[in-house]
Image: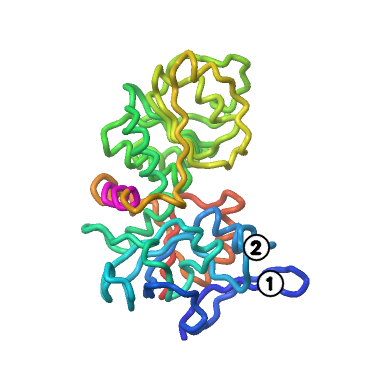
Amino acid sequence: MFKALLVEKDDEGKTSASVTEISEDQLPEGDVTVAVEYSTVNYKDGLCIGPGGGLVRNYPHVPGIDFAGTVESSSDDRYKPGDKVVLTGWRVGENRWGGYAQKARVKADMLVPLPEGLTTRQAMAVGTAGFTAMLAVMALEDHGIKEGPVLVTGAAGGVGSVATAILANLGHQVAGVTGRPETADYLRELGATQIVAREEINETTKRPLETETWGGCVDAVGGAMLARVLGQLQYGASVAAVGLAGGANLPATVVPFLLRGVNLLGIDSVMQPYDNRLRAWQRIAKDLPMDKLEAMVRPATLADLPQLGADILNGQVQGRVVVDVNA
């Protein structure tokens, strides 16, 4: 028996989350059983834990959209007992049991070997948010980052925090957009050289093009903010869009694409090919400053998760929450 955060639904459709003990026989089928050490708290986790279950398809359910740990047993030759591994994506924690348990069983294809130089705790300090941030930075690099500051929207959140730290560590000037003035010092510690008020980017304008300002953008918000940023990008610059917190609608015109040649790059961390996942994690181990990473981390336990699920949905979680499932 081992501990897990189990979300259950009653006959009236109400869901509840509690820490309980389950057996290995209850785990889903898979090639590899992992002794989970750490997971994280993301927006999707909040939806899965909260009332109504959000993204969950079947109950009972173990949330947690990522985890890192040690292989306990494997029927796949690629992984041996004792190997350190990390998992992000594949709808784990949504359609399939995830990381909020002391053990997980998954298909071998879902895993990536933990890169040398990263601990399992550090991997989850990065987590899905940081992995997504690195995918966004890689996409900007592939299309060429222009001179001048790189804009990061939603900069105080999970994706934005890591993107800010990575870009700054690579030598770029970073302008962090935040709606909370109290996070300015936090963003400067991560390497932001400029703090931009959310209201400044969200200001309504009818002009499809504005002054060429940003050499690139990691956008974790979407919606009207993304539309405004498109008109402020330098000629040929790109925006890597990773989030929909501001809505899925894009109230923009084709003018920035036709007259400025800007690129809109969609980033999906769920179904990345193995080679791209491995490259992203290797780049994280190389290019993300671990001292800045530690400054983002807030520790948590399984017992903290019901409240944290509510907090992240209410926008009250800053930086990265690392869950020690064995604490």
Q: Is residue 164 above or below residue 2?
A: above
Specify which label sits upstream in the sequence, 2 or 1.
Answer: 1
Find the magenta span and give its range.
276-283
Q: Which quadrant is home to the C terminus?
A: bottom left
Q: Is residue 105 visible?
A: yes
> Where is mark 2, residue-wise?
53
Q: Main secondary structure of the magenta part?
A: helix
Report how far apart the C-alphas of labels 2 and 1 lie in the structure. 8 Å
State left or right for residue 25 relative to residue 55: left
Identify the secondary structure beneath mark 2. loop
Instruction: Mark 1: give few (<14), some (14-19) or many (20+) Cα within 10 Å.
Output: some
Q: Residue at x 30, y 31 (%)?
A: 172
Q: Is residue 238 above or below residue 35?
A: above
Q: Which residue is mark 1?
A: 9
Q: Secondary structure at mark 1?
A: strand
User: Is 131 covered by the magenta stretch?
Assistant: no
Assess whether residue 279 is covered by the magenta stretch: yes
Residue projecting furthest to the left: 116
Residue at x-position 55% and y-position 80%: 20
Q: Residue at x 48, y 45 (%)?
A: 157
**Amino acid type assigned to the residue bearing label 1 in the image:** Lys
Mark 2, residues whose alpha carbon is within 10 Å: few (<14), some, or many (≥20)? Answer: many
